[in-house]
């Protein structure tokens, strides 16, 4: 017998808090994949009472969607975390630094 699941061929794309699930759904939507929000409890009792949610979508597109989604998230992170900005500011106090500083002239944090 091959009937291991009672669900109708849905792949779980994400498990977590509601905001993160909404973010996942938004990305999938932008990529052109319709997905659905559900309570994680349906996946098993270990998720009960935790306030977790799941994002599901049809299994046949799931692998492609996951790949595209990871790519999209990586791109978003790169755009938001431009490394150049970090290099020119002290991580502790935010003071402007020039490239040859080994410690912050403002708060004395050592970068060596
Ligand atoms: Zn500093």
Image (cartoon, rainbow, N blue to C red):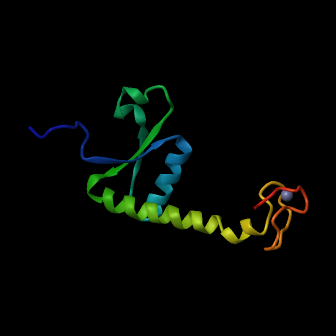
Q: Is residue 99 left or right of residue 50?
A: right
Residue nearest the viewer, comparing 68 with 61: 68
Residue 74 in sight from this viewpoint: yes
Residue at the (41%, 65%) spot, across then down: 68
Which part of the image, by quadrant, shows the N terminus?
Answer: top left
The x, y position of residue 21, in whole percent, is 49, 47
Extreme-front residue of the structure: 112
Residue nearest the viewer, comparing 37 with 103: 103
Residue at the (61%, 68%) spot, across then down: 79
The quarter of the rendering in which ligand 1 is drawn is bottom right
- Whether 47 is drawn above or below 96: the answer is above
Residue at the (87%, 56%) spot, across then down: 108
Extreme-bottom residue of the structure: 99
- Whether 86 is drawn above or below 38: the answer is below
The x, y position of residue 32, in whole percent, is 40, 64
**In the rendered image, which quarter is residue 90 located in?**
bottom right
The x, y position of residue 45, in whole percent, is 37, 26
The x, y position of residue 20, in whole percent, is 53, 47
Extreme-right residue of the structure: 106
Label total for image = 0
Residue at the (48%, 59%) spot, across then down: 27
Extreme-left residue of the structure: 1
Residue 33 in sight from this viewpoint: no
Residue nearest the viewer, comparing 36 with 4: 4
């Amino acid at each position: 017998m091959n009937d291991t699941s009672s669900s109708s061929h849905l792949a779980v794309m994400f498990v977590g808090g509601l905001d993160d699930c909404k973010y996942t759904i938004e990305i999938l939507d932008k990529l052109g994949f319709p997905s659905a929000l559900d309570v994680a409890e349906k996946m098993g009792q270990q998720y009960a009472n935790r306030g977790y949610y799941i994002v599901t979508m049809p299994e046949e597109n799931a692998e492609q969607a996951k790949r595209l989604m990871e790519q999209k998230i990586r791109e978003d992170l790169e755009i938001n975390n431009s490394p150049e900005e970090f290099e020119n500011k002290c991580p502790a106090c935010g003071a402007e630094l020039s490239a040859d500083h080994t410690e912050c002239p403002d708060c004395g944090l050592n970068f060596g």
